[in-house]
Amino acid sequence: MPILIADTADIPALVALLNSAYRGDASKKGWTTEADMISGEIRTDEAQLIQLMQKPGAIFLKYTNNNDHIEGCVFLEMREGRLYLGMLSVAPALQAKGIGKQLMTAAEAYAKLQGCPAIFMRVISIRSELIAWYERKGYHKTGEVQPFEDSVYGAATVPFEFLVMQKDL
């Protein structure tokens, strides 16, 4: 399936995908849900995605099926000579079928094309299964910890923080 750079016409589909993967009852069908850790029914909205897409050095990659339906995505942004990876999402019913792995591979290829020596991300500290998945993909904990800040998109319902993980390319 093709992995392409998303554009503003994709925003409604990306918002639906991201919200279904992270929040609400639909997200509980997959293993990436934050619904039991963060309050709120939405993870993002169109305004936030427009803002992210307009940032210099930032893109969304989208994974589409044969009907051009977006089934996965990842946000990438150049930050201080490294590539930040966030919002890695796969439709809950399609998780564990290799789409996330393909998006990660595409993100690494993009980073190399941009001359980045590393990719980094923030992972919720209590998500041990997710941390282990990233470790199997070659990421390691950097030792840096960042606070979770409540926002219009939700408040923490259990204590956690973000671990910064990185993969050197």
Image: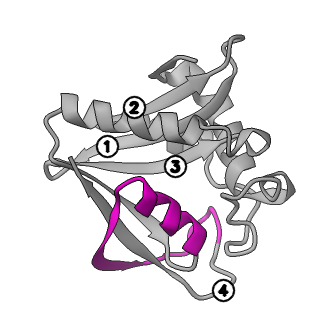
Q: Which residues are magenta?
A: 128-154
Furthest residue in direction top, as rendered:
67
Disc number lying in front (2 or 3): 2
Could one spot residue 57 in this view of the protein?
A: no
Disc number lying in front (2 or 4): 2
Task: Name the quadrant of the N terminus.
Answer: top right
Residue 30 relative to residue 121: left or right: right
Residue 154 relative to residue 49: left or right: right
What residue is disc 3 on?
87
Numbered-mark total: 4
Q: What's the distance in space between the residues labelled 2 and 4, CA to CA?
A: 33 Å
Residue 62 relative to residue 90: left or right: left
Residue type, numbered disc 1: Glu
Q: Is residue 54 magenta?
A: no
What residue is disc 1 on?
77
Q: Secondary structure at mark 1?
A: strand
Name the N-terminal-most of marks 4 and 3. 3
Name the N-terminal-most of marks 4 and 1. 1
| Quadrant in the picture for residue 157 | bottom right
| Quadrant in the picture for residue 159 | bottom right
What residue is disc 2 on?
106
Q: Secondary structure at mark 4?
A: loop
What residue is disc 4 on?
158
In this rendering, is residue 15 above or below 71?
A: below
Q: Secondary structure at mark 2?
A: helix
Estimate how packed mark 3 is, as few (under 14), some (14 to 19) or many (20 or more) residues with alpha carbons within 10 Å: some
Name the N-terminal-most of marks 1 and 3. 1
Estimate how packed mark 1 is, as few (under 14), some (14 to 19) or many (20 or more) residues with alpha carbons within 10 Å: many
| Quadrant in the picture for residue 13 | top right
